[in-house]
Amino acid sequence: MAPLNLKIDAHQHFWKFDAFSHSWINDEMKVIRRDFMPDDLEPVLQAAGIDGCVLVQVDQTEDENDFQLENARKHDFIKGVVGWTDLQSPDVAEKLAYYKRYPKMKGFRHILQGEKDRALMLKPAFQRGIGALREFGYTYDILIYPDQLGYARDFTAAFPDQPFVIDHVAKPYIKEKKLTAEWQAAIRAVAAQQNVYCKISGMVTEADFNHWRPEDIMHPYIDTVVEAFGTGRIMFGSDWPVCLVAASYEQWYGLVKEYFSRFSAAEQSAFFGGNAIQFYNL
């Protein structure tokens, strides 16, 4: 395992832009309609004093796993990969066993936020796949919108020994400045499961791209997450390059660094690296 004092960006992406595969990048996000590769990120991490990162899937294909694992093989600063596999497949165990030959494959994710069936995570076939993850030592990233948090509570409670992490604080309605009691209550209910972590990431992209202010994000939303999960189950993530539609890497990192400056050195070390290292077994 890596030293716990390393600084880790727990959530970022690479892609070779394809208009069909990446159709979610709309006109409002055209600044990221290009390739983003390790050579683009490495100097950005170095400038911020970040030692390594966790690379998270974008496309829901096994070709994506090959692409990202090859990036990780070539670059030591990529400490782990969160890939994709069909968790509902009857042969999911065989797939998971195959990926054990790649030490940097740390976990898996499905883009649940985009599913028409908002409760897909509760379906028996999906849960059978989740049940196989623990056997192989894999984590699971939960990518959802606020309307799915209630399902996520039941989902994570059904697998108390499985390490889960909520991506992007479940994407609250920051642009609308709607700090809803429902979102707060749902986040707290999920956080009550001690096997669930949360990434403080992807928040500027849920705000007004051009007119967000730090105070729109820091105290309404980050306060809630820190209070709910504590400093032992939260992680820093940039969501680079998606964050670039609203903020530079430096802006987002600076905002979060300022927020956590009031915490102890040990708590800051845990948030900016130690928790991710332990969760993903980096």
Image (cartoon, rainbow, N blue to C red):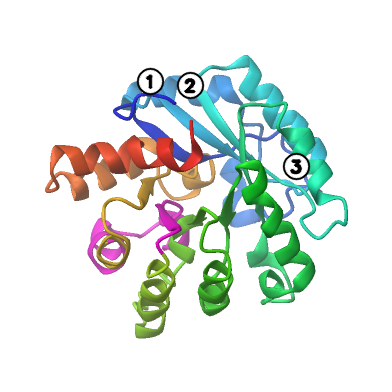
Q: Which mark sits nearer the N-terminus, 1 or 3?
A: 1
Say what secondary structure mark 2 lies in: helix
Query: What residue type is disc 1 on?
Result: Gln
Of the pair 260 and 215, the residue shown nearer to us: 260
Q: Is residue 34 left or right of residue 255?
A: right
Residues at discs 1 and 2 in contact (Cβ within 8 Å): yes
Q: Which residue is mark 2?
A: 42
Give the SS element for disc 3: helix
Residue 55 found in image quarter: top right
Give the label, 3 or 2, closer to the camera. 3
Identify the residue shown where x is 29% and y is 28%.
Answer: 5
Query: Residue visible at 68% across and 58% down?
Result: 131
Q: Residue furthest bottom?
A: 181
For disc 3, the marked residue is 96
Q: Which residues are magenta?
A: 194-222
Q: Label 3, label 2: how many angstroms apart (C-alpha)?
A: 29 Å
Callout 3: 10 Å neighbours few (<14), some, many (20+)?
many
Q: CA distance from mark 1 to mark 2?
A: 6 Å
- The image position of residue 100, as x and y in percent, is 70, 32
